[in-house]
Image (cartoon, rainbow, N blue to C red):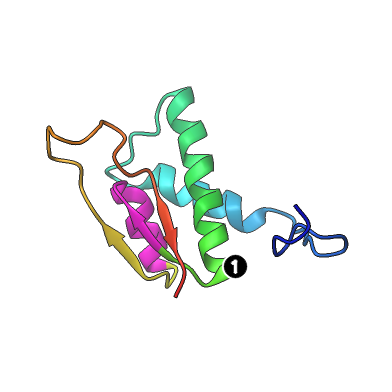
């Protein structure tokens, strides 16, 4: 466990989560957002956390979620949107994937 970057003693960083809340609000406000239900709002929180991780670690984002893609792109994250329009793919083909260099 401690050979993972960030998992060792004194390696964790805390923040006030204000940026995550801001991202969550932007995702919920997106015209294509389906975050109206309780489950959808939880999903928006998870998307905001994914975006925060991408920004903090300089990662690229691959997602099937248009709202997350647009907010991430506006925040300067290199992002790829892959809409799930194929019947060959599971319903949750790509929630979000983070790619390093």
Q: Is residue 33 above or below residue 21?
A: above
- Residue 8, position as x, y percentages in the image: 81, 60
In the picture as drawn, the residue positioned furthest to the right comes out as 10
Q: Is residue 32 magenta?
A: no
| Left/right of residue 21 with respect to residue 97 in the rendered view | right
- Residue 31, position as x, y percentages in the image: 28, 45
Q: Secondary structure at mark 1?
A: helix
Residue 78 appears in which quarter of the rendering? bottom left
Circle 1 packing at 10 Å, graded few (<14), some (14-19), many (20+), is few
Q: Main secondary structure of the magenta part?
A: helix
In the picture as drawn, the residue positioned furthest to the top comes out as 38
Q: Is residue 83 above or below residue 41?
A: below
Q: Is residue 90 above or below residue 65?
A: above
Which residue occupies the foreground of this view, 54 or 68?
54
In the picture as drawn, the residue positioned furthest to the bottom comes out as 101
Q: How many marks?
A: 1
Q: Is residue 94 above or below residue 53?
A: above
Residue 62 appears in which quarter of the rendering? bottom left
- The magenta segment is 61-74
For the point 34% across and 65% down, the residue is: 79
| Left/right of residue 51 with respect to residue 67 in the rendered view | right
User: Quick one: quadrant of the C terminus?
Assistant: bottom left
For the point 59% across and 53% down, the residue is: 20
| Left/right of residue 101 with respect to residue 11 in the rendered view | left
For the point 78% across and 60% down, the residue is: 12
Q: Is residue 67 magenta?
A: yes
- Residue 34, position as x, y percentages in the image: 33, 34
Find disc 1 in the rendering and name its residue: 56
For the point 51% across and 52% down, the residue is: 50
| Left/right of residue 14 with respect to residue 93 in the rendered view | right
């Amino acid at each position: 466990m401690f050979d993972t970057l960030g998992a060792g003693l004194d390696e964790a960083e805390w923040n006030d989560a204000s940026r995550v809340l801001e991202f969550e609000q932007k995702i919920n406000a997106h015209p294509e957002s389906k975050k109206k239900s309780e489950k959808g709002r939880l999903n928006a929180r998870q998307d905001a956390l994914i975006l925060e991780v991408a920004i903090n670690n300089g990662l690229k984002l691959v997602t099937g979620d248009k709202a997350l893609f647009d907010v991430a792109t506006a925040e300067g994250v290199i992002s790829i949107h892959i809409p799930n329009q194929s019947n060959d793919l599971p319903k949750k083909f790509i929630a979000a994937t983070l790619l390093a260099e």
